[in-house]
Amino acid sequence: MTSNDQPPRRDVPFEAPTRLSEPSADTQYAVAAQAGSAVLEAGLQDVDTAVRDAHAELESALIARYQSRQAESQDVTSFLSPAGSIQGVAIGLGDPDSPSLPGEPAMSVYVAEPTEARLVREMVVDDFGISSARDVPILVRQDVFDASAHRFRIRPAPGGVSTGHTAATAGTIGCLAVGRTEPRNQRLLFLSNNHVIANSNKASLNDPIIQQGRFDGGAAPVDQIAVLERFRPIAFDNTPNLVDCATAWCWPDRVRPELVRILGGAQTFFRIGRQPVSPFLGMGVGKSGRTTQVRQGEITDLGWTGIINYDGHQALFTNQIAIRPVSALEFSAGGDSGSIVWTWDATRSPVGLLFAGGFRHTLANPMALVLDALDIDLFT
């Protein structure tokens, strides 16, 4: 048996939820923000300096242009969403559909509509003034990202199933966690997205969290398993975001540390690791989510910066992980938000927190940033 097969050990029982009085704290977020680039550094250490420099320059240019449009109260889509315009930037590896050599690091440029690589390079070099991108390999990826089945009711509830705030639709329970300091180290928490269990900043602490989510028929109080305990607010102004995450304080008898999958028509359960690992290009990953269940994927890009659509609003994110499926089946779909992304190997080590999906790619927050932002450790 691997260490992931052993149940978590704890000498002191967890406390049941009581009324919270403290605000949604973010004392750890400044630390997480400073560490944002360092988390992905290990996965990019072999990338050519020219590619990394071009990526950094285009990233800065995208952020600056987004912030200027916000300051002028202009629609961000006026420069990000027209046909062929740039949605985001990252660093990836050449694939069979790109002019770059297979496996060669390149700057990935995300566009809204099919656009020739030559035209994308002209936009980067001429429109954005990134002269360093003139000679680096460029991958063109078409995608527009929206914040995005295990829809049944189950007790105790595992990771990978439907959940949500009573005013939201439905997302996914990621996995269990505990706070790092008192009194939160006596609380059994589950991890998901802000937009899933904190209703994109609109919720209040102590709000009921249900399983299944409202879209799948859940309602309070009969389906309540937790209360909203903490969330990192999503900035919809000109501030770059690193994470979309939140925790719910659970009744201990209503949740379980395993994740679920459907195999042969039956529910089966498995464990994931507790210690996050740094992502790298080409890493094989998996996830268990409310809509598409267990799927396998591959990390295609690191350091993704761009715009995420949130039900009529837009938010700027930076230093994200991009994932694509390894088969004809999509890696994620709407309702899979909140899923834990883990390594596709025997350790199943946590890599990220799934929060958005597009036509062909899925985005995840680096797990180390999530844990620091919420001041938690996983309890798996």
Image (cartoon, grey):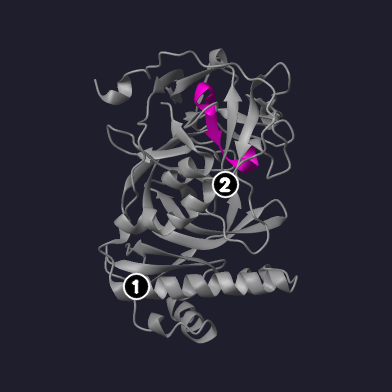
Q: Residue 244: which disc?
A: 2
- Counting other residues with Cα less than 10 Å from the Cα at mark 1, is it few (<14), some (14-19), or many (20 or more)? many
- Nearer-the-camera pick, 256 or 38: 38
Position of residue 350 in the picture relative to residue 197 (left or right): left
In the visual, does 157 lie left or right of 237? Answer: left
- Quick one: which residue is furthest to the front in this view? 182
Residue under the image location 67 percent in, 19 percent down: 223
Q: Is residue 186 magenta?
A: yes
Image quadrant of residue 204?
Answer: top right
* Residue occupying the point 48% across, 77% down: 120
Q: Which residue is painted at 60% across and 16% down in the image?
A: 16
Q: Is residue 85 visible?
A: no
Residue 23: percent from left, percent from top: 67, 38
Say which amino acid is labelled 2: Asp
Question: Which structural element holds mark 2?
Answer: loop
Residue 338: percent from the left, percent from the top? Answer: 54, 38
Q: Which residues are magenta?
A: 184-196
